[in-house]
Image: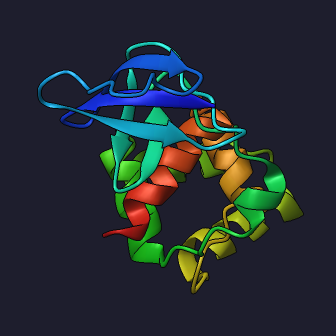
Amino acid sequence: MLTALVKDTRVISVIEGEPPEGWEAPDDCIPVPIPEGVEVTGDETTYVDGVFSSKETPPPPMTDEMRSEMLPLSPRQFRLGFLKAGHAPSQIEAVIEATPDGPDKEAARIEWEFAREFERLHPLVVSLSTSLGFTAEQVDEMWTTALAL
């Protein structure tokens, strides 16, 4: 059994085994049993609302399956998202115009001008973001920001 000593919301120490009989936690600390399977490491671990979390543990990387489940953006959100990320609509249009003539270019123009919504993994979204130098993670961040607009 492991017990965390929590001061405010920060884990300051971990005690292994049962605390000795008559033991009292230091002032301003509360002992909190650590559930089996939960890893509490380093001094960056916090305990808030019954949950241990660590700044040292990055979130799991997003997969294409998770990206496919992201809500679509309206044309307004899509354009404002790129604008907030530093790319004006005129830059998007320049990327489309730089595409070699043919059906792909015409399809991109039609999507840009007339789409009612944009899906995160739509070929136009992937192509534009790649052409503008975005990583998939940067597009995810832009997408999440744009959803709130």
Which residue is the extreme one toward the front?
21
- Residue 112 position in % (x across, y down): 58, 69
Residue 1, relative to residue 17: is it above or below?
Answer: below
Q: How many marks?
A: 0
* Viewer-nearest residue: 121 or 29: 29
Q: What residue do we see at 49% from left, 30% from top?
A: 3
For the N terminus, which image quadrant? Answer: top right
Residue extending farthest to the bottom is 116
Q: Is residue 105 visible?
A: no
> Which residue occupies the foreground of this view, 36 or 42?
36
Q: Quadrant of the C terminus?
A: bottom left
Q: Is residue 131 left or right of residue 65?
A: left
Could you say which quadrant of the image residue 85 lies in?
top left
Q: Residue at x 64, y 67 (%)?
A: 70
Image x and y of residue 75, in percent: 47, 75
Q: Position of residue 35 (x, y in %)?
A: 61, 44
Residue 16: x %, y % from top left:
57, 18
Work out whether 40 lies above or below 83.
Answer: above
Q: Decide if residue 121 is on the left or right side of residue 93.
A: right
Q: How is the image coloured?
A: rainbow
Q: Is residue 25 visible?
A: yes
Is residue 94 positioned above or below 18 on the image? below
